[in-house]
Amino acid sequence: MFDVKKPEMTNKTFRMPMLLVNRLQELAQKKDVSLNALVVQCCEYALENLKESQGEVK
């Protein structure tokens, strides 16, 4: 049976360097994804690939 799922989301505000935001916006446009979706993917990738010595957050 098909089960439609909606992930739970929350709003947060982060301060980021303008150059980083510009780079992310450019990449999001090139890849045809929203800036939000790109930032989520970047954060998930970073957390999944932390070195063991840096502590793992999951």
Image (cartoon, rainbow, N blue to C red):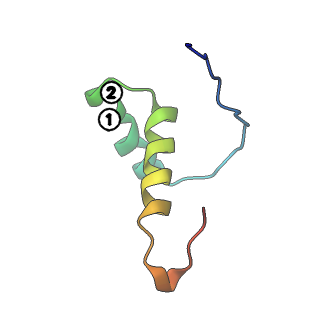
Rendered residue at 49%/86% (across/down): 53
Residue 55 in the image: state x and y as whole percent.
Answer: 56, 79
| Residue denoted by label 1 | 26
- Please give the name of the residue rendered at 73% of the width and 37% of the height, measured from the top-left corner: 10
Q: Is residue 8 above or below residue 40?
A: above
Please state if 23 lies on the left or on the right of 46 as rendered. Answer: left
Whether 43 is drawn above or below 24: the answer is below
- Between residues 7 and 17, which one lies in front from this camera angle? 7
Circle 1: residue type: Glu
In this picture, residue 53 sits left or right of residue 32:
right
Which label was assigned to residue 2?
Answer: none
Q: Nearer the viewer, residue 35 or 4?
A: 4
Task: Residue at 51%, 43% (x, y): give it.
Answer: 40
Quadrant where the image shows the N terminus: top right
Instruction: Give the residue at the far bottom of this rendering.
Output: 53
Q: Residue 54's spot in the image, x, y percent?
A: 51, 81
Q: Residues within 10 Å of mark 2 (few under 14, many from 20)?
A: few
The extreme top residue here reads 1
Would you place residue 54 above or below residue 39 in this image? below
Q: Could you classify mark 1 by the number of other residues whose Cα lies within 10 Å: few (under 14), some (14-19), or many (20 or more)?
A: few
